[in-house]
Amino acid sequence: MSQKTTHEWLPFYLRDHMAGARTGVRLFDRVAQGHSRHQVRTEVARTHGEVEQDCRALRVMMTDLGMRQVSLTMFMGVFGELVGRLKPNGAIFKRSIGADVLELEALVAAVEAKARLWETLIALSGSIPELDSEKLRHLQDRAGDQRDTLIGLHAQVVRTTPIG
């Protein structure tokens, strides 16, 4: 892949990930504040701080690469997240048990996407000097740890949630 080809798609790719990262930070905050289980709220709140740091790291990388960070995708992500809150879930005035499970699944998916971002940037770091492969590997490892934590929380919630 030529540098010119990389630079043609990379800004769009990074802006889309930035939009997802900002949406993910809001979702982590919502789960940290609203999950029905104290242990989940505590662990997600801890992870939320790391996710904010990861979002800042992406913002710095984009600045170092001379890329703007605002896009239509970002506004669509905010809109989509707000619309997603309006879904019928059988519990109009209270939180549904299903939301506790589904939101953890969404957090796992967000962290998986972030890990793929770092993986992609590691692969490109040899041809783009602004990308620090060591820092990217650290971010990728941290995403793996976050995923493992969230999968564990999800399994615990599913195992202990009444079905009927």
Image: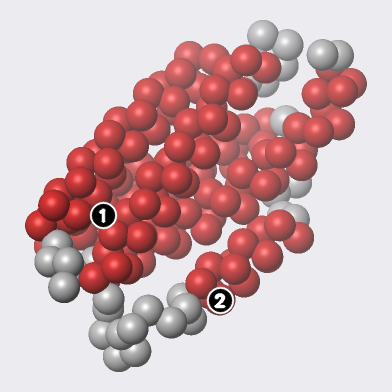
Is residue 118 depicted above or below 72 in this figure? above
**Badge 2 amino acid:** Val
Q: Please, which residue is most extreme toward the front here? A: 164
- The residue located at (86%, 31%) in the rendering is 8
Return the residue at label 2.
83
Res. 117 visible in picture: yes
Expressed as whole percent of the image width and height from the top left, the position of residue 120 reads 61, 24
Residue 88 occupies quadrant? bottom left
- Near-viewer residue (91 or 164): 164
Q: How is the image coloured?
A: secondary structure
Expressed as whole percent of the image width and height from the top left, the position of residue 64 reads 68, 31
Return the residue at label 1.
45
The answer for how far apart the CA atoms under marks 2 and 1 are is: 23 Å
Residue 120: mark: none
Q: Is residue 91 left or right of residue 82?
A: left
Location of the N terminus by quadrant is: top right
Location of the C terminus by quadrant is: bottom left
Expressed as whole percent of the image width and height from the top left, the position of residue 31 reads 31, 63
- Near-viewer residue (154 or 50): 154
Numbered circles on residues, count: 2
Q: Earlier in the sequence, mark 2 or mark 1?
A: 1
- The residue located at (46%, 46%) in the rendering is 110
Residue 129 occupies quadrant? top right
Q: Tell me the element at label 1.
A: helix
Q: Tell me the element at label 2.
A: helix
Q: Please, which residue is most extreme toward the bottom here? A: 93
Assess disc 1: are there few (<14), some (14-19) or many (≥20) residues with their C-alpha within 10 Å of its C-alpha: some
Res. 67 visible in picture: no
